[in-house]
Image (tube, rainbow, N blue to C red):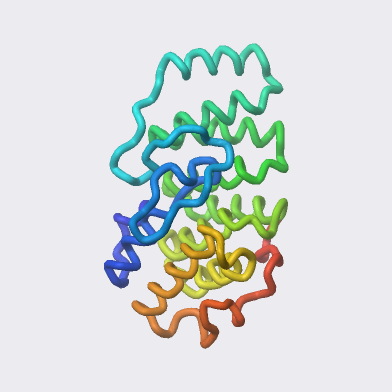
Amino acid sequence: MKPESLVFATSGLFFGLIVGWIIGSQQAGRVPTPAAPAPAAQTATTTTPMAGSGQPAVLDESRVRALTAAAEERPQDVAVRVELANLYFDAERFADAIKWYEQALALDPKNVNVSTDLAVSYYYTNQPDRALAQFDVSLGVDPRHTKTLLNQGIVRAFGKQDLDAAAQSWQKVIEIAPDSAEGRAARQALDGMKSAHPGVGGTGGTGGAAAPAAGTPPSGSA
């Protein structure tokens, strides 16, 4: 479910920060939030509103038709499927995005960016458990993928209301890349959550001393 639909006892500041950070690896960096700069884009070349912003991109139907035809002609072409998925993701048509991300991942199962974007799409179609399972797949490929860990924490917090688990995800981001955009966002999220819920995350600070060792995949990772 989307964060705004939750009955969640938290501060307005924390909510405002987190709602802007449920982003895909390839959509990252398109719209910075006031609280923290968005991460640099990995494969996207345009700037459009992120999912959940209330301003979805207008779907370019002619581009979709051209890419769909190309996908039919080239059944092994990963890039065309990723581009199609990204177009649908930007337009907040997540069920359609899932179809193409799944096809791309079937052809390139080690593509951690596609895997994480698929997980985000699952989240936006009211499948938080499936999203978390897919994040585990991403972390099985790259246990230090900070965008995955950042979003895993968001889904744990808002999709499952498991604040301690969310804190563990964000602490790992801080351990791995404290000065990155993701690290700064994780620190702000963790500090905001602890301000609203002082008992969350144990006694460790935002340096992550209480978190599992950096780089260790969560339980159940593929």
Displayed quadrant of residue 21: bottom left
The residue drawn where x is 55% and y is 28% is 83
- Relative to 131, 50 lies left or right: left
Q: Say how many tags the image has.
A: 0
Q: Residue furthest front?
A: 179
- Residue 161 horizontal side relative to residue 99, left or right: left
Please state which of residues 124 and 208 is positioned toward the viewer in this rendering: 208
Q: Is residue 192 above or below residue 160?
A: below
Identified at 49% across, 41% down, the residue is 27
Residue reaching furthest bottom?
203
Pinpoint residue 181: horizontal percent, then vertical percent: 51, 58
Above or below — where is 28 with respect to 102? below
The picture places residue 205, in percent across and down from the top left corner, at: 52, 82
Q: Residue at position x 59%, y 26% from top?
A: 81
In the image, residue 131 above or below residue 64:
below
Q: Position of residue 221 (x, y in %)?
A: 69, 58
Q: Residue at x 42, y 36 (%)?
A: 47
Is 132 positioned to the left or the right of 221 in the image? left
Quadrant in the picture for the C terminus: bottom right
Q: Is residue 26 above or below residue 74?
A: below
Q: Nearer the viewer, residue 61 or 162?
A: 61
Question: From the viewer's perspective, is 76 left or right of 198?
Answer: right
Residue 80, position in %: x, y? Answer: 60, 23
Residue toward you, 178 or 155: 178
